[in-house]
Image: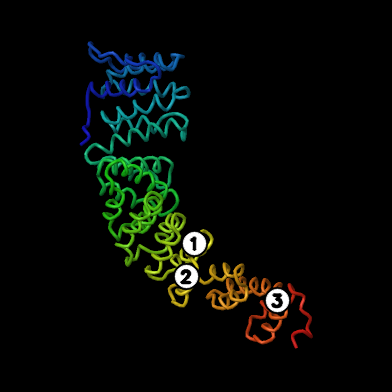
Amino acid sequence: MRKILSGKPIGLAVGLAFAVLLVGCDGMGPADRTQPSPDAEAMQREVDAALVIPNLSERFIALGATLSGLTAENAPGAGAAYAENIIIVRGCEVRPFASAWGKLDPAAAIDFALNLQRHGSQRRREAISEVVASWAAIGEGKDAMDFLATLAPGSEDQRVVARNLATGLAGLGNWDGAIRVLGGIPDGEPRDMLLFKVYRELLRTEPDGIRNFVDSIPVDAPNNLKAKAFARSLALLASLNPDYAREWFQKHMLTDYATGEAIKNILDGLVIQDPSEAVRWLASVPPSAARDDGLRDAAYRWLKGNPGDAYEYLRPELHKAEFAPAIFPFAQFMILQDPKDAVDWARRVPHPVERYKVLTQALIKWGRIDRKAVIQWVRETPEVDEAVRKEVVKALKIEPHELT
Protein backbone atom coordinates (compact mmCIF):
# COMPACT_ATOMS: atom_id res chain seq x y z
CA MET A 1 0.00 0.00 0.00
CA ARG A 2 1.18 3.50 -0.75
CA LYS A 3 1.37 5.69 2.31
CA ILE A 4 0.09 9.25 2.38
CA LEU A 5 2.95 11.38 3.64
CA SER A 6 2.40 14.52 5.68
CA GLY A 7 4.45 17.20 7.40
CA LYS A 8 8.22 17.34 7.08
CA PRO A 9 8.71 13.97 5.31
CA ILE A 10 6.82 15.41 2.34
CA GLY A 11 9.43 18.08 1.91
CA LEU A 12 12.25 15.58 2.24
CA ALA A 13 10.58 13.48 -0.46
CA VAL A 14 10.61 16.54 -2.70
CA GLY A 15 14.28 17.05 -1.98
CA LEU A 16 15.07 13.45 -2.87
CA ALA A 17 13.02 13.76 -6.06
CA PHE A 18 15.20 16.66 -7.10
CA ALA A 19 18.35 14.87 -6.02
CA VAL A 20 17.81 11.88 -8.30
CA LEU A 21 17.68 14.24 -11.25
CA LEU A 22 21.26 15.31 -10.70
CA VAL A 23 23.82 14.02 -13.17
CA GLY A 24 27.38 13.36 -12.05
CA CYS A 25 26.70 14.44 -8.45
CA ASP A 26 26.66 11.10 -6.61
CA GLY A 27 26.22 11.46 -2.91
CA MET A 28 24.88 14.99 -3.13
CA GLY A 29 21.40 15.79 -2.01
CA PRO A 30 19.39 18.07 0.25
CA ALA A 31 20.64 18.51 3.74
CA ASP A 32 18.36 17.52 6.62
CA ARG A 33 16.77 20.49 8.28
CA THR A 34 17.68 20.94 11.94
CA GLN A 35 15.68 24.16 12.28
CA PRO A 36 11.90 24.68 12.16
CA SER A 37 10.39 24.99 8.71
CA PRO A 38 10.17 28.56 7.43
CA ASP A 39 6.92 30.43 7.24
CA ALA A 40 5.24 31.14 3.91
CA GLU A 41 7.05 34.44 3.30
CA ALA A 42 10.45 32.97 4.06
CA MET A 43 9.71 29.92 1.91
CA GLN A 44 8.75 32.20 -0.98
CA ARG A 45 12.04 34.09 -0.71
CA GLU A 46 14.12 30.90 -0.55
CA VAL A 47 12.37 29.23 -3.49
CA ASP A 48 12.53 32.43 -5.51
CA ALA A 49 16.28 32.63 -4.94
CA ALA A 50 16.75 28.95 -5.87
CA LEU A 51 14.75 29.17 -9.09
CA VAL A 52 16.99 31.85 -10.60
CA ILE A 53 20.29 29.98 -10.03
CA PRO A 54 21.76 29.62 -13.54
CA ASN A 55 23.45 26.24 -13.12
CA LEU A 56 20.91 23.41 -13.41
CA SER A 57 22.52 21.02 -10.95
CA GLU A 58 23.10 23.76 -8.39
CA ARG A 59 19.51 24.88 -8.84
CA PHE A 60 18.22 21.35 -8.15
CA ILE A 61 20.36 21.10 -5.01
CA ALA A 62 19.10 24.44 -3.73
CA LEU A 63 15.46 23.61 -4.47
CA GLY A 64 15.80 20.22 -2.79
CA ALA A 65 17.33 21.73 0.33
CA THR A 66 14.74 24.51 0.50
CA LEU A 67 11.72 22.32 -0.15
CA SER A 68 12.80 19.74 2.40
CA GLY A 69 10.96 21.98 4.85
CA LEU A 70 7.70 22.13 2.87
CA THR A 71 4.52 22.05 4.96
CA ALA A 72 0.87 22.75 4.32
CA GLU A 73 1.34 26.13 5.96
CA ASN A 74 4.29 27.36 3.91
CA ALA A 75 3.49 25.66 0.61
CA PRO A 76 1.51 28.70 -0.63
CA GLY A 77 4.71 30.74 -0.32
CA ALA A 78 6.61 28.26 -2.46
CA GLY A 79 3.69 28.26 -4.90
CA ALA A 80 3.85 32.04 -5.18
CA ALA A 81 7.54 31.84 -6.09
CA TYR A 82 6.85 29.21 -8.75
CA ALA A 83 3.98 31.27 -10.16
CA GLU A 84 6.10 34.41 -10.44
CA ASN A 85 8.90 32.51 -12.19
CA ILE A 86 6.78 30.12 -14.22
CA ILE A 87 8.21 31.37 -17.52
CA ILE A 88 11.65 29.96 -16.58
CA VAL A 89 10.55 26.94 -14.55
CA ARG A 90 11.14 23.50 -16.04
CA GLY A 91 8.76 20.58 -15.76
CA CYS A 92 11.23 18.60 -13.68
CA GLU A 93 11.25 21.50 -11.21
CA VAL A 94 7.51 22.00 -10.86
CA ARG A 95 6.38 18.36 -10.86
CA PRO A 96 7.94 17.22 -7.53
CA PHE A 97 6.72 20.37 -5.80
CA ALA A 98 3.15 20.08 -7.12
CA SER A 99 3.06 16.40 -6.21
CA ALA A 100 4.21 17.09 -2.65
CA TRP A 101 1.77 19.97 -2.11
CA GLY A 102 -0.99 17.76 -3.48
CA LYS A 103 -0.33 15.29 -0.68
CA LEU A 104 -0.32 18.00 1.97
CA ASP A 105 -3.31 20.08 0.88
CA PRO A 106 -4.78 19.03 -2.48
CA ALA A 107 -7.51 21.68 -2.53
CA ALA A 108 -4.97 24.49 -2.15
CA ALA A 109 -2.53 22.81 -4.53
CA ILE A 110 -5.07 22.40 -7.32
CA ASP A 111 -6.10 26.03 -6.90
CA PHE A 112 -2.43 27.00 -7.33
CA ALA A 113 -2.07 24.82 -10.43
CA LEU A 114 -5.25 26.04 -12.08
CA ASN A 115 -4.31 29.66 -11.53
CA LEU A 116 -0.80 29.51 -12.91
CA GLN A 117 -0.17 32.15 -15.57
CA ARG A 118 -0.16 31.23 -19.26
CA HIS A 119 -3.36 29.20 -19.33
CA GLY A 120 -2.86 26.07 -21.38
CA SER A 121 0.91 26.03 -20.95
CA GLN A 122 2.82 22.80 -20.49
CA ARG A 123 3.96 23.76 -16.97
CA ARG A 124 0.40 24.43 -15.90
CA ARG A 125 -0.71 21.04 -17.21
CA GLU A 126 2.21 19.34 -15.47
CA ALA A 127 1.35 20.96 -12.17
CA ILE A 128 -2.30 19.97 -12.44
CA SER A 129 -1.28 16.43 -13.36
CA GLU A 130 0.92 15.97 -10.33
CA VAL A 131 -1.57 17.45 -7.88
CA VAL A 132 -4.36 15.24 -9.18
CA ALA A 133 -2.16 12.14 -9.06
CA SER A 134 -1.44 12.82 -5.39
CA TRP A 135 -5.08 13.65 -4.67
CA ALA A 136 -6.20 10.32 -6.10
CA ALA A 137 -4.48 8.56 -3.20
CA ILE A 138 -6.39 10.49 -0.56
CA GLY A 139 -9.77 9.19 0.65
CA GLU A 140 -10.04 6.82 -2.33
CA GLY A 141 -10.07 9.85 -4.60
CA LYS A 142 -13.61 10.88 -3.61
CA ASP A 143 -12.86 14.59 -3.17
CA ALA A 144 -10.84 14.60 -6.40
CA MET A 145 -13.77 13.04 -8.27
CA ASP A 146 -16.14 15.59 -6.76
CA PHE A 147 -13.80 18.33 -7.94
CA LEU A 148 -13.75 16.85 -11.44
CA ALA A 149 -17.54 17.13 -11.56
CA THR A 150 -17.27 20.90 -11.09
CA LEU A 151 -15.20 21.45 -14.24
CA ALA A 152 -16.76 22.38 -17.56
CA PRO A 153 -17.29 19.28 -19.72
CA GLY A 154 -14.87 19.16 -22.62
CA SER A 155 -12.63 21.89 -21.23
CA GLU A 156 -8.87 21.48 -21.18
CA ASP A 157 -8.84 21.48 -17.38
CA GLN A 158 -11.44 18.74 -17.28
CA ARG A 159 -9.45 16.61 -19.72
CA VAL A 160 -6.20 17.04 -17.79
CA VAL A 161 -7.81 16.31 -14.42
CA ALA A 162 -9.80 13.34 -15.75
CA ARG A 163 -6.76 11.85 -17.47
CA ASN A 164 -4.56 11.96 -14.39
CA LEU A 165 -7.32 11.01 -12.00
CA ALA A 166 -8.24 7.92 -14.01
CA THR A 167 -4.64 6.76 -14.36
CA GLY A 168 -3.89 7.55 -10.72
CA LEU A 169 -6.90 5.66 -9.39
CA ALA A 170 -6.24 2.69 -11.66
CA GLY A 171 -2.60 2.52 -10.63
CA LEU A 172 -3.61 2.59 -6.96
CA GLY A 173 -6.01 -0.31 -7.46
CA ASN A 174 -9.13 1.83 -7.11
CA TRP A 175 -10.75 0.40 -10.22
CA ASP A 176 -14.28 1.44 -9.31
CA GLY A 177 -13.13 5.05 -9.12
CA ALA A 178 -11.21 4.85 -12.39
CA ILE A 179 -14.23 3.30 -14.12
CA ARG A 180 -16.45 6.05 -12.78
CA VAL A 181 -14.13 8.68 -14.24
CA LEU A 182 -13.81 6.91 -17.58
CA GLY A 183 -17.55 6.36 -17.83
CA GLY A 184 -18.12 10.08 -17.52
CA ILE A 185 -16.04 10.85 -20.63
CA PRO A 186 -17.78 10.72 -24.04
CA ASP A 187 -16.80 7.90 -26.38
CA GLY A 188 -14.15 9.08 -28.83
CA GLU A 189 -10.46 9.43 -29.57
CA PRO A 190 -9.54 11.40 -26.39
CA ARG A 191 -10.94 8.65 -24.19
CA ASP A 192 -9.34 5.97 -26.38
CA MET A 193 -5.97 7.58 -25.73
CA LEU A 194 -6.75 7.79 -22.02
CA LEU A 195 -7.59 4.08 -21.92
CA PHE A 196 -4.11 3.29 -23.22
CA LYS A 197 -2.62 5.47 -20.47
CA VAL A 198 -4.67 3.58 -17.90
CA TYR A 199 -3.53 0.25 -19.33
CA ARG A 200 0.07 1.40 -19.13
CA GLU A 201 -0.38 2.00 -15.42
CA LEU A 202 -2.04 -1.37 -14.98
CA LEU A 203 0.93 -3.09 -16.60
CA ARG A 204 2.96 -1.91 -13.62
CA THR A 205 0.68 -3.65 -11.13
CA GLU A 206 0.06 -7.28 -12.09
CA PRO A 207 0.37 -9.52 -15.18
CA ASP A 208 -3.39 -9.79 -15.65
CA GLY A 209 -4.13 -6.23 -14.56
CA ILE A 210 -5.55 -5.03 -17.89
CA ARG A 211 -7.74 -8.08 -18.40
CA ASN A 212 -9.08 -8.04 -14.84
CA PHE A 213 -9.73 -4.30 -14.98
CA VAL A 214 -11.75 -4.55 -18.19
CA ASP A 215 -13.64 -7.58 -16.89
CA SER A 216 -14.68 -5.50 -13.87
CA ILE A 217 -16.32 -2.80 -16.01
CA PRO A 218 -20.12 -3.25 -15.90
CA VAL A 219 -21.74 -4.10 -19.22
CA ASP A 220 -24.08 -1.14 -18.81
CA ALA A 221 -21.33 1.38 -18.04
CA PRO A 222 -22.15 4.72 -19.71
CA ASN A 223 -20.75 6.04 -22.98
CA ASN A 224 -20.09 2.61 -24.47
CA LEU A 225 -17.22 2.13 -22.03
CA LYS A 226 -17.33 -1.67 -21.80
CA ALA A 227 -17.16 -2.31 -25.54
CA LYS A 228 -14.54 0.34 -26.19
CA ALA A 229 -12.35 -0.65 -23.23
CA PHE A 230 -12.50 -4.28 -24.37
CA ALA A 231 -11.59 -3.38 -27.94
CA ARG A 232 -8.75 -1.05 -26.99
CA SER A 233 -7.29 -3.53 -24.53
CA LEU A 234 -7.27 -6.22 -27.21
CA ALA A 235 -5.35 -3.91 -29.54
CA LEU A 236 -2.63 -3.58 -26.92
CA LEU A 237 -2.59 -7.16 -25.66
CA ALA A 238 -2.60 -8.64 -29.18
CA SER A 239 0.56 -6.69 -29.96
CA LEU A 240 2.22 -8.00 -26.79
CA ASN A 241 0.95 -11.59 -26.68
CA PRO A 242 -1.49 -12.68 -29.44
CA ASP A 243 -2.21 -16.08 -27.86
CA TYR A 244 -3.06 -14.50 -24.51
CA ALA A 245 -5.33 -11.94 -26.17
CA ARG A 246 -7.08 -14.57 -28.28
CA GLU A 247 -7.70 -16.83 -25.27
CA TRP A 248 -9.27 -13.93 -23.38
CA PHE A 249 -11.35 -12.88 -26.38
CA GLN A 250 -12.78 -16.37 -26.76
CA LYS A 251 -14.18 -16.20 -23.23
CA HIS A 252 -16.21 -13.17 -24.30
CA MET A 253 -16.82 -14.19 -27.90
CA LEU A 254 -20.60 -14.49 -27.62
CA THR A 255 -21.14 -11.18 -25.82
CA ASP A 256 -22.55 -8.07 -27.46
CA TYR A 257 -19.32 -6.13 -26.94
CA ALA A 258 -16.97 -8.74 -28.47
CA THR A 259 -17.71 -7.78 -32.07
CA GLY A 260 -16.69 -5.21 -34.65
CA GLU A 261 -13.75 -3.20 -33.37
CA ALA A 262 -12.79 -5.87 -30.82
CA ILE A 263 -12.33 -8.49 -33.52
CA LYS A 264 -10.49 -6.06 -35.76
CA ASN A 265 -8.07 -5.09 -33.00
CA ILE A 266 -7.18 -8.62 -32.05
CA LEU A 267 -6.75 -9.56 -35.69
CA ASP A 268 -4.41 -6.67 -36.41
CA GLY A 269 -1.86 -8.37 -34.19
CA LEU A 270 -2.62 -12.00 -34.96
CA VAL A 271 -2.89 -11.70 -38.75
CA ILE A 272 0.50 -10.03 -39.06
CA GLN A 273 2.31 -12.40 -36.70
CA ASP A 274 0.72 -15.70 -37.78
CA PRO A 275 -1.77 -15.50 -40.68
CA SER A 276 -2.16 -19.29 -40.85
CA GLU A 277 -3.28 -19.44 -37.22
CA ALA A 278 -5.53 -16.44 -37.82
CA VAL A 279 -7.30 -18.22 -40.69
CA ARG A 280 -7.86 -21.36 -38.63
CA TRP A 281 -9.08 -19.44 -35.61
CA LEU A 282 -11.41 -17.16 -37.55
CA ALA A 283 -13.31 -20.15 -38.88
CA SER A 284 -14.62 -20.61 -35.33
CA VAL A 285 -15.61 -16.98 -34.77
CA PRO A 286 -19.29 -16.00 -35.24
CA PRO A 287 -19.96 -14.19 -38.55
CA SER A 288 -19.51 -10.43 -38.66
CA ALA A 289 -18.12 -7.82 -41.02
CA ALA A 290 -14.95 -7.57 -38.92
CA ARG A 291 -14.48 -11.34 -38.98
CA ASP A 292 -14.90 -11.45 -42.76
CA ASP A 293 -12.40 -8.63 -43.24
CA GLY A 294 -9.93 -10.39 -40.97
CA LEU A 295 -10.30 -13.72 -42.76
CA ARG A 296 -9.79 -12.07 -46.15
CA ASP A 297 -6.66 -10.28 -44.93
CA ALA A 298 -5.25 -13.35 -43.19
CA ALA A 299 -5.78 -15.57 -46.23
CA TYR A 300 -4.07 -13.00 -48.46
CA ARG A 301 -1.05 -12.75 -46.14
CA TRP A 302 -0.77 -16.52 -45.77
CA LEU A 303 -0.94 -17.10 -49.53
CA LYS A 304 1.71 -14.46 -50.05
CA GLY A 305 4.03 -15.60 -47.27
CA ASN A 306 3.68 -19.39 -47.52
CA PRO A 307 1.75 -20.19 -50.70
CA GLY A 308 2.27 -23.95 -50.63
CA ASP A 309 0.82 -24.56 -47.18
CA ALA A 310 -1.89 -21.94 -47.66
CA TYR A 311 -3.04 -23.50 -50.93
CA GLU A 312 -3.17 -27.02 -49.49
CA TYR A 313 -5.22 -25.85 -46.52
CA LEU A 314 -7.57 -23.36 -48.17
CA ARG A 315 -8.58 -25.10 -51.39
CA PRO A 316 -10.59 -27.93 -49.77
CA GLU A 317 -12.14 -25.53 -47.23
CA LEU A 318 -13.46 -22.88 -49.60
CA HIS A 319 -16.72 -24.68 -50.25
CA LYS A 320 -17.71 -23.98 -46.63
CA ALA A 321 -19.77 -20.87 -45.97
CA GLU A 322 -17.49 -19.65 -43.18
CA PHE A 323 -14.56 -19.50 -45.63
CA ALA A 324 -16.39 -17.50 -48.32
CA PRO A 325 -14.46 -14.25 -47.61
CA ALA A 326 -11.21 -16.11 -48.40
CA ILE A 327 -12.28 -16.92 -51.97
CA PHE A 328 -11.36 -13.45 -53.21
CA PRO A 329 -7.67 -13.57 -52.14
CA PHE A 330 -7.49 -17.21 -53.24
CA ALA A 331 -8.76 -16.32 -56.72
CA GLN A 332 -6.23 -13.48 -56.90
CA PHE A 333 -3.48 -15.91 -55.97
CA MET A 334 -4.61 -18.36 -58.66
CA ILE A 335 -4.35 -15.74 -61.42
CA LEU A 336 -0.58 -16.15 -61.39
CA GLN A 337 -0.70 -19.91 -60.90
CA ASP A 338 -3.45 -20.94 -63.32
CA PRO A 339 -5.60 -18.11 -64.75
CA LYS A 340 -8.11 -20.55 -66.24
CA ASP A 341 -8.70 -22.08 -62.80
CA ALA A 342 -8.75 -18.58 -61.33
CA VAL A 343 -11.74 -17.73 -63.54
CA ASP A 344 -13.77 -20.49 -61.93
CA TRP A 345 -12.82 -19.30 -58.44
CA ALA A 346 -13.47 -15.67 -59.34
CA ARG A 347 -17.07 -16.43 -60.30
CA ARG A 348 -17.65 -17.69 -56.74
CA VAL A 349 -16.48 -14.50 -55.02
CA PRO A 350 -19.49 -13.28 -52.93
CA HIS A 351 -18.97 -9.52 -53.16
CA PRO A 352 -19.96 -8.06 -56.57
CA VAL A 353 -17.21 -5.43 -56.72
CA GLU A 354 -14.52 -7.93 -55.73
CA ARG A 355 -15.96 -10.49 -58.16
CA TYR A 356 -15.84 -7.99 -61.05
CA LYS A 357 -12.26 -7.07 -60.22
CA VAL A 358 -10.77 -10.55 -59.96
CA LEU A 359 -12.84 -12.09 -62.76
CA THR A 360 -11.77 -9.36 -65.16
CA GLN A 361 -8.12 -9.78 -64.18
CA ALA A 362 -8.27 -13.57 -64.53
CA LEU A 363 -9.91 -13.49 -67.96
CA ILE A 364 -7.44 -10.92 -69.31
CA LYS A 365 -4.48 -12.90 -67.95
CA TRP A 366 -5.86 -16.11 -69.43
CA GLY A 367 -6.61 -14.36 -72.72
CA ARG A 368 -3.03 -13.26 -73.14
CA ILE A 369 -2.00 -16.89 -72.83
CA ASP A 370 -4.85 -18.42 -74.85
CA ARG A 371 -6.89 -15.76 -76.62
CA LYS A 372 -9.11 -18.19 -78.51
CA ALA A 373 -10.08 -20.04 -75.34
CA VAL A 374 -11.20 -16.82 -73.65
CA ILE A 375 -13.17 -15.71 -76.72
CA GLN A 376 -14.94 -19.04 -76.65
CA TRP A 377 -15.57 -18.69 -72.91
CA VAL A 378 -17.08 -15.23 -73.34
CA ARG A 379 -19.21 -16.46 -76.23
CA GLU A 380 -20.51 -19.46 -74.27
CA THR A 381 -21.06 -17.64 -70.98
CA PRO A 382 -23.85 -15.15 -71.65
CA GLU A 383 -24.61 -14.76 -67.94
CA VAL A 384 -21.28 -13.02 -67.27
CA ASP A 385 -21.64 -9.43 -66.10
CA GLU A 386 -21.77 -6.98 -69.00
CA ALA A 387 -19.16 -4.79 -67.31
CA VAL A 388 -16.74 -7.73 -67.20
CA ARG A 389 -17.45 -8.60 -70.82
CA LYS A 390 -16.78 -5.05 -72.02
CA GLU A 391 -13.52 -4.80 -70.06
CA VAL A 392 -12.21 -8.10 -71.39
CA VAL A 393 -13.23 -7.34 -74.99
CA LYS A 394 -11.50 -3.99 -74.79
CA ALA A 395 -8.31 -5.33 -73.17
CA LEU A 396 -7.95 -8.23 -75.61
CA LYS A 397 -9.15 -6.18 -78.62
CA ILE A 398 -11.79 -8.77 -79.49
CA GLU A 399 -13.74 -7.86 -82.64
CA PRO A 400 -17.55 -8.21 -82.63
CA HIS A 401 -17.50 -10.89 -85.35
CA GLU A 402 -15.26 -13.05 -83.11
CA LEU A 403 -18.11 -13.36 -80.60
CA THR A 404 -20.71 -14.52 -83.12
Q: Residue at x 28, y 46 (%)?
A: 207
In the figure, residue 396 lies in which quadrant? bottom right
Q: Give the labeled residue for mark 3.
A: 370
Q: Residue at x 28, y 16 (%)?
A: 39
* Image position of 332 (left or right of 230): right
Q: Residue at x 21, y 32 (%)?
A: 3
Please name whichever residue, 21 or 278, is drawn nearer the observer in this view of the structure: 278
Kindly report which numbered mark, 2 or 3, lies closer to the viewer in this rendering: 3
Work out whether mark 1 precedes mark 2 in sequence or the reverse, and give the earlier one. Answer: 1
In the figure, residue 159 lies in which quadrant? top left
| Labels 1 and 2 touching (C-beta < 8 A) | yes
Identify the residue at the far top of this view: 35
Q: Give the labeled residue for mark 2.
A: 314
Work out whether mark 1 precedes mark 3 in sequence or the reverse, and give the earlier one. Answer: 1
Give the alpha-carbon distance from disc 2 to disc 3, as whole Å. 27 Å
Residue type marked 3: Asp
Q: Give the labeled residue for mark 1.
A: 302
